[in-house]
Amino acid sequence: MPMTMPMPMTIIIIVTTTMIINSHHHDHDHDHTHGDSTTKSWVGPDGKVYHSHDGLAPHSHEPIYSPGYFSRRAPPLLTRDFNERAFTVGIGGPVGTGKTALMLALCKFLRDKYSLAAVTNDIFTKEDGEFLVKNGALPEERIRAVETGGCPHAAIREDISINLGPLEELSNLFKADILLCESGGDNLAANFSRELADYIIYIIDVSAGDKIPRKGGPGITQADLLVINKTDLAPAVGADLTVMERDALRMRDGGPFVFAQVKHGVGVEEIVNHVLQAWELATGKKRH
Ligand SMILES: Nc1nc2c(ncn2[C@@H]2O[C@H](COP(=O)(O)OP(=O)(O)O)[C@@H](O)[C@H]2O)c(=O)[nH]1
Ligand SMILES: *[C@@H]1O[C@H](CO)[C@@H](O)[C@H](O)[C@H]1NC(C)=O
Ligand SMILES: *[C@@H]1O[C@H](CO)[C@@H](O)[C@H](O)[C@H]1NC(C)=O
Ligand SMILES: [Mg+2]
């Protein structure tokens, strides 16, 4: 993430000079730049530092002081017109937890009965889109890959137009019933805007340890469904699934979660049921 990148050399020099001139005054105000000339930062009306780069809308990396609350997450938009853009499922989660594997599994499960289309986000490649094509998830023309640049969370939260464009286009082209949108892998703070996702799935895995659910973060607390993937690996990393279950329930005020082995098909039907239930509720249609 940009915040953890080493400071550009010039900043270190400025701080040192200030300290020599006035040893009591540790003034190290500086522009939060990414060391490239296209990044600008400023303080917004809310007092937070905003910046803009990679052609993405202004966004902030200010600390978030609460892990967030499932019960206070933004509810699905009641004003959505599903003729304009089909019911959209957002799939988020850290790098390598199984987002693309879940996209593939959902496509295989739903494609015979529903018209589907998919948009994948990667930071600098179209790798996940290509993976779905290669694995025959859907006909190639129903899959679009979007390159988001360095801040994948911006493309699902502040600057969703980069995803809305292809989603609306696919939706109209194929009279889609359901759209799947995979976020680029990001940290636990990345969550979806309701403008983009009618149903939000956040997927973590056991391999980073059983501590992850209790760390919370908007990704975990504000998803409609939490998926804990790769439970087959739990013994190898010493992750305690009962701890993960307890913490997931606690952090999400009892909100739903599913233990899964996406690659082995375990838990996928349960995830599909959650998706279709939300689809029925939002669109007023009955599952076929
Ligand atoms: N099997 C196995 N698990 C490991 C090894 N190193 C770390 N882990 C597990 O991997 C998970 C993440 O490790 P940790 O150091 O806490 O990650 P970090 O906090 O993200 O740096 C934890 O569940 C560890 O128990 C290892 O060498 N072998
Ligand atoms: C995700 O976080 C943003 C920024 O805090 C918020 O506006 C949005 O409503 C959140 N999404 C959900 C589903 O709660
Ligand atoms: C979960 O997703 C990852 C990443 O795509 C995938 O490689 C992995 O096989 C999945 N987990 C299991 C248990 O299959
Ligand atoms: Mg992926």
Image (tube, rainbow, N blue to C red):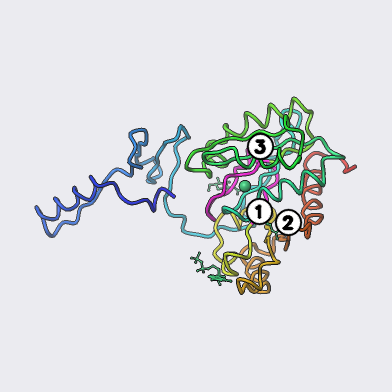
Q: Residues within 10 Å of mark 2 (few under 14, many from 20)?
A: many
Q: Answer above or below: position of 217 versus 276.
A: below
Q: Is residue 167 above or below residue 66?
A: above
Percent x, y for residue 22?
Answer: 10, 55
Q: Quadrant of the C terminus?
A: top right
Is 230 positioned to the left or the right of 20 in the image? right
Q: Quadrant of ligand 1?
A: bottom right
Q: Earlier in the sequence, mark 3 or mark 2?
A: 3
Q: Is residue 185 magenta?
A: yes
- To which quarter of the image does residue 39 belong? top left
What is the three-letter code of the residue carrying label 2?
Answer: Val
Binning the other alpha carbons within 10 Å of mark 3 as few (below 14), some (14 to 19) or many (20 upward) gives many
Mark 1 burial class by Cα count in 10 Å: few <14, some 14-19, many 20+: many
1 or 2: tag closer to the N-terminus: 1
Is the residue marked 1 within 8 Å of ligand 3, measured from its CB? yes
CA gap, disc 1 and disc 2 = 7 Å
Which residue is located at x 14 percent, y 50 percent? 17
Q: Which mark is residue 119?
A: 3
Q: What amino acid is labelled 3 in the image?
A: Val
Q: Is residue 156 magenta?
A: no
Label 3, label 2: how far apart the Cα atoms are: 19 Å
* Mark drawn on residue 98: 1
Which residue is denoted by mark 2 in the rendering? Answer: 262
| The CB of the residue at mark 2 lies under 8 Å from ligand 3 | yes
Label 3 SS: strand
Q: Position of residue 114 (x, y in %)?
A: 84, 38
Query: Which stretch is magenta?
Result: 181-203
Above/below status of 90 relative to 260: above
Q: Is residue 258 left or right of residue 247?
A: right
Q: CA distance from mark 1 to mark 3?
A: 16 Å
Residue type (three-letter) at the residue carrying disc 1: Gly
